Image (cartoon, grey):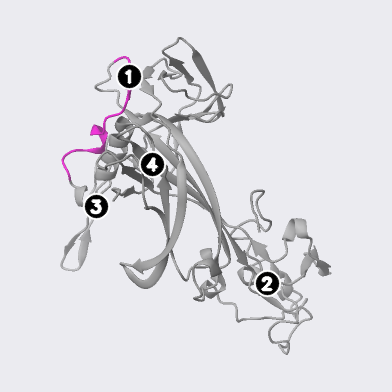
Amino acid sequence: MNKLIIRNDFKVKLFKLTVYISFFILLFGCIEQVEFAPIATTSNLVVRARITNEVKTHTVEISRTIPINSSTIKYEKNASVFLTDDTGATYNFQEVSDGIYNSVTPFAAEENKKYELHIETSNGLKYTSTQESLPGISTIGDINLSVEPNQFDPIDELVIKVNSNITTDNGKYYRYEYDETFEIKTPLWSRKKLLIISDSTPYEFELVDKTEEEDGIGFCYPNNKSKNIMLTETVTLAQDQVTGFPVRKIPIRSYFIGRRYSIFIKQYVINQNTFDFYTLLNKFSSPDDIFSQTQVGNIPSNISAEVNPTEDKVIGFFEVSSVSTKRIFVNRNEFTSEPFINYRALVFCDEFVKPEIVDASGLSPLLRRLNTGWIYQSLSEGPSDIPGGPYRLIRKPCGDCSHLGPVNPPDFWIE
């Protein structure tokens, strides 16, 4: 079997590198406040850089470490970024937004070449990576589905597993990502909507037909990307082939797989240095190792400062990998006949109201409802004998799924 290594989004782990500790002392029902001196933090460079064998515009992201109590990323602006290879070629990057640098021209990493990343910050500090080369290429083979017991829950789950094709090289390391899209149906769809024409006296509203371009036809297409780093290796296997590696598990009753579902899987072949880097990140993010004396700052990077590398640490990695992709579509009836739980079960959809346009005080209950998450619902569905105004309303999530995803299918969608 392939060894599975899953860890939380490493990007967050890279940014939040300092820990603040606080505690309360309780004595005879009184709380004594303890003052702590500010903890000094070091502003280390954070680099996320990957080039692949795809002909495309590649990206390097650069920022600085931030305290754990901060939520604002500190981007590294106005840096000079470029790659070189061992043939003497240079690949320049330009800043397209704060801390985001794209290659000036599209290119692809090639086999038998060694690449080196160079960064010079706006204050003149220079950083260089080790030389990294493209590993062997392995393509995605079959993607299989199976309904299996969930070891933590009595509800079964759909498990999506990937296989790679056999290669002639031995000792490969793999990383996986996915991008999923699914179709959901609005529980209580109406072909009309109520517009606010005037939000002051005299209040005015207009009932109009929905348009397919703006409002859709009652379906939505949410999208999620993988938030975990998934690694496996074939070094310990008889042949270089990933077999039955689980990239996604979804509870069988989830509305994610209630109708039609698609998953786009990316398989990266990485070298051992990259694999070891992600493995160490996984180790340090384990709850069992929170109080380990080995700190996150000790995770080695293949990028270092040209001056004073011992003190001027770099967090992150320059990755050179080959990539293979594959997309599949699946309908619910292809793997189960069990009912699913619609997302409407997550909100209260049994309440209908018919607010007055203007009440005795001169205010508009209808306007207030429309401005606080209620929408028009046709009288053909649900109870119609509700007293009140001329228009019946429901909570917006019950008749509009756009809070979950776009109302029109993406370009790649196939029915």
Reading the image, the residue beneath label 4 is: 175
Which image quarter: residue 102?
top right
Tag 3, which secondary structure? helix
Q: Amino acid at mark 2?
A: Arg
Q: Amino acid at mark 1?
A: Ala
Q: Measure how far apart labels 1 and 2 are at the Cα level.
A: 58 Å
Q: Residue at x 77, y 60 (%)?
A: 212
Q: Residue at x 46, y 9 (%)?
A: 88
Give the mark nearer the N terminus: 2 vs 4: 4
Q: Tell me the tag on residue 305.
A: 1
Of the pair 11 and 319, the residue shown nearer to us: 319
Q: Amino acid at mark 3?
A: Pro
Give the mark nearer the N terminus: 4 vs 3: 4
Q: Measure how far apart labels 4 and 3 are at the Cα level.
A: 22 Å
Q: Nearer the viewer, mark 3 or mark 2?
A: 3
Query: Residue 178 placed where, x, y %?
Result: 47, 48
Q: Is residue 178 visible?
A: yes
Reading the image, the residue beneath label 2 is: 369
Reading the image, the residue beneath label 3 is: 287
The furthest residue to the bottom = 385
Q: Residue at x 66, y 55 (%)?
A: 409
Q: Residues within 10 Å of mark 4 (few under 14, many from 20)?
A: many
Q: Tell me the tag on residue 3.
A: none
